[in-house]
Amino acid sequence: MNRSLKERLRELDIDLPQSAPKPGANFLPVKQVGNLLYVSGQVPVLDGVDQYVGKVGRDLSLEEGQRAARLCAVNMLAQVDRAVDGDFSRVAGCVRLGGFVNATEDFTQHPQVINGASDLMIAVFGDAGRHTRAAVGCISLPRNVAVEVDGIFELK
């Protein structure tokens, strides 16, 4: 892909955060091992403020959960952009996503929630955005956010 990540996101009407979210604990936001870039779990934060707080299936709808997952993916792309110094041409594609949904006990649509992140990866990377994935329900997540998504990206 010859376009920059920011250009592609602009085409999709998505603004990348000015700075990638900083971790709230003792871990790296991104770590490169060989040609793989591991991105730690991203939560739905916008301008430093948690968005989509609460449990999907009680406080938030499926659609709101999907929007939360999409925002997690936007924050993940901000981490990738920072890791490659803005040179999106270095990214071959998305290898894997892991999605965690803060959901009620009877909620069963975790895969559909995490589609919010998966769909964005495919929109950004095309076929190179197709990835393996896990989507699981959790009793809670940090700061009671609705979704957390981590990922692995391949570098050229």
Image (tube, rainbow, N blue to C red):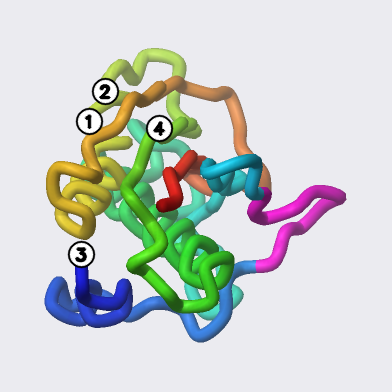
Quadrant of the rendered image containing residue 116: top left
Label 3: state its secondary structure.
Answer: loop
Percent coordinates x, y for residue 43 in the rendering: 53, 53
Q: Do the residues labelled 1 and 2 touch (CB within 8 Å)?
A: yes
For the point 15% across and 55% down, the residue is 123
- Give the numbered dot on residue 109: 2
Q: Nearer the viewer, mark 2 or mark 3?
A: 3
Between marks 1 and 2, how big is the CA–CA gap?
A: 5 Å
Q: Distance between the residues labelled 4 and 1?
A: 16 Å
In the image, what residue occupies the spot 47% across and 57% down?
Answer: 76
Distance CA(mark 2)–CA(mark 3): 33 Å
Please tell me whether mark 4 or mark 1 is closer to you in this view. 4
Identity, as a three-letter code, of the amino acid under mark 2: Gln
Q: What residue type is labelled 4?
A: Arg
Q: Name the residue under label 3.
A: 1
> In this rendering, would 30 be left or right of 84?
right
